[in-house]
Amino acid sequence: MEPEGAVILFSRSIEKHGLQYVSFIGDSKSFLEVKMTQPYGPDVEIVKEECIGHVQKRMKQNERYGGPLGELVQWSDLLSTLYILGHDLTVTSEFEQLGEILNKLPSANSPCQSRTNLPVDIIYTDIVGLAQFKKRVKAGYGKFSCLLRILDSFGTEPAYNHRAYAKSHKILTSWGGQELVPQQFFTMFPHSPDNSFMGFVVEQHLNDSVVEDIKRKNQALVYGKNDYMWNGKTEYLDVIKKHLDVHGTVYDGSQDSTSNVPSFVTNHGILNGKDLQHLLRETKIFIGLGFPYEGPAPLEAIANGAVFINPKFDPPHDSKNTKFFKGKPTNRGLSSQHPYAEQFIGEPHVYSIDIKDLNLVEQTVKKIIEKDLFEPYLPYEYTEEGMLQRMNAYIEHQNFCQFQKQPVKWPPEGSITNIYGDPGKSCKDVCWENNLICERSHFLELNSHDTLTKYSEVECHDKKASSDIFYPAMNVKTGECIIQKEELLFSCVGENKTLSRLCPCRNYMKGQSAMCQGCDR
């Protein structure tokens, strides 16, 4: 099918048939053209049903048409990392190939085979791949489940992961209910301490000799590769235009593909990595529009010395007020377009502001220009070495196949501080307020009435056990000490206004938040 014809078919589906097509079967070029035009708006995702499966080819196609997408950045960096660390890899991207691989494993479909005989140590996939995997192995899924690592950009909270709990609380989604250990979900940013932070590598395309010859210009570059992202932002960009030339990298391969881009913007179209980084080196300010959420581009801009204006959200964007997050297995609220840049980097590299306040926007632009500080900065955890270190630690120390309870060896007990939080606060917030990070793997050690009493200033008036995301905790009104009955519901993010939670909080290496101090030795 020609790309133009595919776009017409999708664009007319509501008018002619009262339907939205959410699946696409055909060649990748046509699919990408349809995806870029967003025929039903940004909140309706169209998924390509695979007929061919060449991973490298698909990555190049996405790069050409406005990417690569964040998930593909993760996949390419994961494959490179595992290869450099010396692991033997088998890669598949389609159902038929998966079947061929599993058929070579002895009794893969049998639930009885010993796991020790499986000729595989870890299986990396995403939610779609997990569904295919379950369908293929059927009864044999149980012995593979602890080997799984799920690439999951936005994270999966314990409440959504536990099928019975999610169903009873009416929050079960097609993405949730997997009933894996929450640390088996690997995220792009360290926003969900119940999950494991995998991350990615911020590429460096320019060598030092080239960088020295690039002069910083009086220009801003807008973060928005699709036209719809620019909708309603003209007044905001008008303010920036008064002080800087405004540039963009908007996909311009179809008719009216830049209709929301103001005429004063110099649009470069989609650039390759080297040309984009050259443009960023010339740029003073990288302008956020509020979407896409939590992408790789702001880190790339900051690494090239541009200052990022990060739009703040009030109230935070979450599944209750933002359609984009509906159905995702998390209740996390985003305080800005890029919470990592806001919380882990900050000024002078990142200014998180309300972009609807045009006076504040102008003050911020003036402040950035007057300071004249455009120094490259890249957190260690997003360098090649940082990712290699982190992933190697996970591979060596994470073991989800132990069915007998054993003391947690990693991260070690010495890195943990146990803290009672104020009523109504999650362990994520309690730990962060103490410059620590909630460490889910150590909840089990705190899950006893004696331990709750040990760290409390008062005695327990009653002792209970319950299955919910708030325990272990003490009820400040009744004096009840409540421990956790269901280990999968141990949660860093659960909060209840009457409960003071006992939280395992871990120290961390500056620039490598997934690892405790000394965990690199």
Image (cartoon, rainbow, N blue to C red):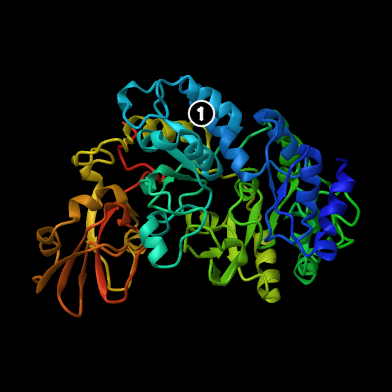
Horizontal arrangement in the rendering, residue 110 relative to residue 323 (left or right): left
The amino acid beneath tag 1 is: Thr
Q: Secondary structure at mark 1?
A: helix
Task: Identify the residue under disc 1.
Answer: 81
The quadrant in which residue 476 appears is bottom left
The one nearer the camera, 261 or 402, is: 402
Residue 440, position as x, y percentages in the image: 31, 51
Residue 428, position as x, y percentages in the image: 36, 60
The quadrant in which residue 241 appears is bottom right
Horizontal arrangement in the rendering, residue 490 relative to residue 511 (left or right): left
Residue depicted at 70% across the width and 34% down the height? 51
Residue 496 showing in the rendered view = yes
The one nearer the camera, 478 or 224, is: 478
In this rendering, the answer to whether 518 lies above or below 336 is above
The one nearer the camera, 365 or 124, is: 124
Q: Which quadrant of the rendered structure holds the C terminus?
A: top left
Callout 1: 10 Å neighbours few (<14), some, many (20+)?
many
Residue 224, position as x, y percentages in the image: 73, 55
